[in-house]
Image (tube, grey):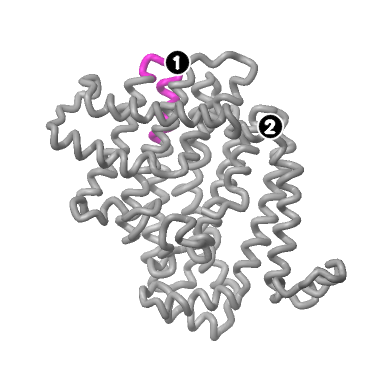
Amino acid sequence: MEALAASIASHVPSGLSLVALASPGEIIRRASRLEDELKELLRVHDGRAGAEQGAGGQQNKERFLRAYERLKTELLNDRAFNFDFTEETRQWVAKMLDYNVPGGKLNRGLSVIDSYMLLREGTEVDDEDFYLACVLGWCVEWLHASALVLDDITDNAYTRRDNLCWYKLPTVGLSAINDGVLLKCHVQAIIKRYFKEKFYFLDLMELWNEIGLQTAMGQMLDLITTHTGAKDLARYRIQGYRRIVKYKTSYYSFYLPVACALLLNGAKLSDYIELKNVLIEMGVYFQIQDDYLDCFGDPEVIGKVGTDIEDYKCSWLIVQAMELANENEMKILYENYGKSDPQCVAAVKNVYKELDLQDIFLEYESRVYKHLVSTIDAEPDRAIREILKIFLKKIYRRKK
């Protein structure tokens, strides 16, 4: 590593201070960032990949937010949903929705709109079609909220989106379990309300049922793997990790928004298998970023306090550490991983730093980015190419 650092340093013009690049790892990190940021400018940040940017993107987001208010009002008041609310239950559901559904970055929901607008490029999109895209976008956000509410309980998490987790509120507690189930049930009711007369309704329902099952299976794999890993950390391996991430995160966060847009545009999902595979790979990359940020990210920026170490999670970092650690480092991991004592957490993080996992993550990010860019460039369909660029731009080098 010292040789690599010296090589990088030799290319720095004389007179430029290297004080800020004190460690070899920091030199490598900055060189990696410069390289990939240049590629970002050349390949992804080309204007066309920014359908969500500018005045049009802001207007779309404003229309999307208005659609949430309409959907919430319908759920609370419209008899077509067959809910016989008392005033007390109506207030509870309204508060629960506002607390959990619209508070995030909304990337998943807005991705339905971005994808649909690109697929419809060159044709007029009327208000009804745009609203239907918003409805499906909010269904994705509803499903995401359901997953987070339940996931926070199983993980014993404390904060989410700069707020207390829903179940941590004194007036909520474990009744949040039912709220998480209710959020998922809302999705089925909304889809039936708006799409039951559409020719693609069966395909849409099959998609959502499949994604729901995959996500639940991913959560089950996560919980079971955590249980077995608590007995023996050596059972945390990259193959098992990728399986968890694929089902728990990739399908609903990356494939589902695009699949909804394709169905809304009248496409057959069976014609887009390669697109699905690329989106799944992006989802794995996204989760690896999440694991990295859980440990090394700023809680003020990411909006939550990371607890993967304390919770014995099968994260990308511990998987890498188990492959690289020497005997002494392995002993430290076995003695401290999965414990809530701050000194134990610090000991694990220190091993991560000794193993240069931050640099290994940057190397992985650079490698997967190059692969994804190459795959996107080879895509013959311009609309699909632009959809993938939008997704990559949203997650590349993200800080939260």
Please name the residue that numbered disc 1 is placed on: 128
Residue 200 picture location, percent across and down:
45, 19
Q: Is residue 47 left or right of residue 313?
A: right
Give whichever of 83, 259 is nearer the camera: 83
Which percent across, then down, holds residue 292?
A: 54, 61
Total numbered badges shown on the rendered structure: 2
Left or right, 235 with respect to 386, comes to left
Q: Name which of mark 1 and mark 2 comes first in the sequence.
A: 2
> Which is more toward the observer, 209 or 159?
159
Q: Is residue 265 above or below residue 152?
A: above
| Residue drawn at (57%, 37%) of the image | 276
The amino acid pointed to by label 1 is Glu
Residue 201 inside the magenta-drawn segment = yes
Q: Which residues are magenta?
A: 195-209
Could you say which is closer to the camera, residue 349 or residue 102?
A: 102
- The residue indicated by pointer 2 is 48
Q: Vertical placement of 68 versus 343: above or below?
A: above
Q: Secondary structure at mark 2?
A: loop
